[in-house]
Amino acid sequence: MLDFPSPAVLSAPPLLPVSADSRLPALAQSDEFRRALTALGQVSVTLPEMNNTLVTTRRLAAGLPLAMINRAALPHPSQLLEALKNNGLGRTPIILSPEHPCPELAEIGALPLVSPAFVARLDLSRSTEARKATLHQKWRNRLTRAESSDLRVSRQNMPLDASHWLFAADQAQQRQRRYRSWPIGLTLAYAKENKGKAKLFQAFHGTDPVAAILILRHGSGATYHIAHATQIGKALSAHNLLMWDAMSWLAAKGCQRLDLGVINTEEAPGLARFKLGTGANLSQLGGTWALWSPLGRLLSPLARWDRKLMGAT
């Protein structure tokens, strides 16, 4: 089973309780995401028994079906099996990535693949003064320096342009760091199908863009989606200025929480420090599991071996 870096160095920010913000679905479970998938012709299924949990489906090269449930709050495993059966997925292999630790999945023979990661979540329901007070000192100092610079900040809906400089920079960064994120087409579909909910914040030094952050809003939450800063932007702490501007704008619009994404202190320590410097809290996800109901009973003993690694810490 794959394992994420130890969260020991992240002990300073408090962990959110498992039930916190359950009323705010993650981006991957939002109506906005569902609309973007539909626009691209992606087949999906909703499970009404599980608060309309979104299940995406695809076919592998051999024509075999595969379903995925990502960032969903899962019920008791027996209820999950019943919901899958009721919606025609009872015999379909499924990849499960729960929103919260769910070691009980081992009881139905789900096999653990990747141990739980941590995400940073920022509470935007507090006052401006309270949000600023929770900024880490170095983060606040960089913000002050950026505010006193000659940077100019703009905010607009994400242009429906696949050649936009932020996309090009993000693609180059993915190749360099060897990871994969959303395809550009999906991001553009999200922006097109959800008017005004893909917000681009840019910082300019003179006429040149030196940093940008793309925020995706969904319901009363939002997600930090893509970001990039040039060397000049980094030197001027432009990213801090944009993040603070985005936080303030989202709060003014009634947004309750900003999901800053996975914290990885080994492969991206600088980004982890930046995210946690905003005053965000840590929340543990549920890892990644493989479930194929017809083999559930046979695999249950094997699944229980790694159950402790998939629980809350």
Image: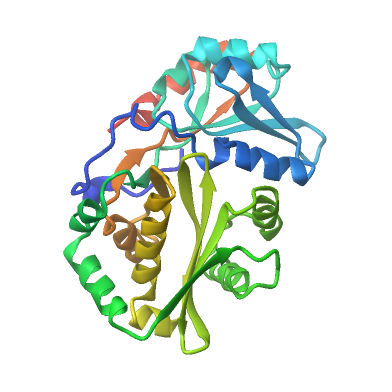
Q: Quadrant of residue 293?
A: top right
User: Nearest the camera: 138 or 272?
Assistant: 138
Query: Residue 201, how many percent across, how many down?
Result: 49, 67
Residue 169 lies left or right of residue 237; in this view the side is right
In the rendered image, the vertical position of residue 303 relative to residue 163, given as above or below:
above
Q: Is residue 179 visible?
A: no
Query: Residue 236, how many percent across, how many down?
Result: 34, 81
Residue at 74%, 40% (x, y): give it. Answer: 38
User: Nearest the camera: 134 or 289?
Assistant: 134
In the rendered image, the vertical position of residue 112 relative to residue 304, given as above or below:
below
Residue 189 lies left or right of residue 286; in this view the side is right
Residue 59 lies left or right of residue 281; in this view the side is right
Q: Quadrant of residue 100?
A: top left
Residue 139 lies left or right of residue 213; in this view the side is left
Query: Residue 238, how many percent across, how many down?
Result: 38, 75
Residue at 39%, 82% (x, y): give it. Answer: 151
In the rendered image, the vertical position of residue 134 relative to residue 146, given as above or below:
above
- Residue that lies at the very extreme toward the right in this rendered image: 63
Q: Quadrant of residue 138?
A: bottom left
Residue at 57%, 51% (x, y): give it. Answer: 197
Query: Residue 123, how many percent across, how many down?
Result: 32, 45
